[in-house]
Amino acid sequence: MKIRDVRITPVSVPVEAPLRYSTGSDPAIHRLIVEVETDQGLVGLGECNAGAAREARLQESIPAILGADPFHTERLRRQIGSPAEAKLFGNVNHTFAAIEFACLDIQGQLIGRPVHDLLGGRVREHIPLAAYLFYRYPNTRGQGAIQDAEGMVNFAQRVVREYGFATLKFKAGVLPPEEELEAILALRKAFPAHRLRVDPNAAWSVGTALRLARKLRDCDLEYLEDPTWGLRGMGRVSARCPWLPLASNMAVATPEDIPPMLRFDAVDVVLIDPHFYGGLFQTRHVGAALEILNVDAALHSQGELGVSMAAQLHLAASLPALTHAADAHYHHLTDDIIDGGKLKYVTGGMQVPTSPGLGVKLDRDKLKQYHELARKLQTAAQTSMVGDPGAAEHLPILPKW
């Protein structure tokens, strides 16, 4: 069996209301959908973060993919996403991840087994997910804004009732720290039994992080994620706040960051991500290494549609040491591009797919609809990584406080 065609489709699927981050805001989840077709007619699906550079990198990879055996993913990784290429030129891990997802989808379809069986088999059938809580701008109908502690608690109560979440994740780094402290304390008061994690996306200086960490000492946080930028900064916060677990997906963004992380003794929980790490197998290996090193593993979310969400579920099912609820933006989405609509939540999480491959198929009408939207939205002015078009200061400067 050989790969005979590769198709790449940018899509943007709206969220209920624009989500705000320390570096910007976004009215939609922007993704690239990859279809890899074999000479036997099987089609595997992949997905990664959008952007012109990643789309171009995928297009550049097609000559290496055409004619390849979809079972030879390690050979493809060395051709497309080798460690040297990934370190020196960027975007490689994300683009290869989409290709690997599709190849594993093909493998699973061919042998009639789900992808998690290709990763060593599932150790759990249900994946708990966290309620991701964002400050939000109003949508085009003037609805959905979250601007203060009261609005944040009201939103959290709504999604906990609707989905059954047992873990809350508060996205900080948007408003002045004292205002966000009020929201965190209000969430803890409203949800005394829930796990509560806070993620400022490196918006705080070391001094601000230390000051806020001390004020949160009695809040019983599950962890504080990337309060400040870089491994040395994280190490300084960790040394002065030994009661508070620190987590990271920014200071620790790839497997190469793990050795210096250990040297600085900077992080207690690593949020692994198959898109950042270059595929499911690479991330599975990192999960095993963290288990050996006695470092907690959690699952990062960068905003997944149904294809990547399915891949995340297969990965989570195969990681024995995954002890934290997985992050997901998914409950903010208004729709999806997969057949049958959005994946369903069950008691605060999702069931692991059991159909062959990833277990999802594309809805062609939705793919077309959200591709047309992508061509309108995927510009420098509309993506969260280049600043917040709704803020007075557009530049994504860190630290902000």
Image (tube, helix red, strand yellow):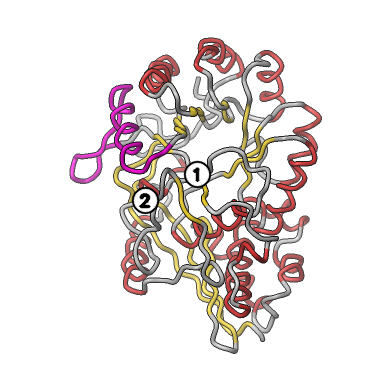
Label 2 residue SS:
strand
Based on the picture, tell me whether residue 347 belongs to the magenta stretch.
no
Q: Which mark is residue 28?
A: 2
User: Which residue is depicted at the point 56% across and 44% down?
Assistant: 300
Tell me where residue 261 appears, x and y as whole percent: 75, 33
Tell me where residue 208 appears, x and y as whole percent: 55, 15
Q: Label 1 amino acid?
A: Pro
| Of 252 and 350, the residue lying toward us | 350
Quote the CA–CA distance across marks 1 and 2.
24 Å
Please identify the quarter of the rendering in which residue 46 is found: bottom right
Q: In the rendered structure, which segment of residues is drawn in magenta?
A: 137-165
Q: In the rendered view, tell whether residue 126 sits above or below residue 210.
A: below
Residue situated furthest bottom in the rendering:
40
Q: In the rendered view, tell whether residue 38 sits above or below residue 212.
A: below
Based on the picture, tell me whether residue 154 belongs to the magenta stretch.
yes
| Of 363 and 122, the residue lying toward us | 122
Nearer-N-terminus badge (1/2): 2
Please identify the quarter of the rendering in which residue 41 is found: bottom right
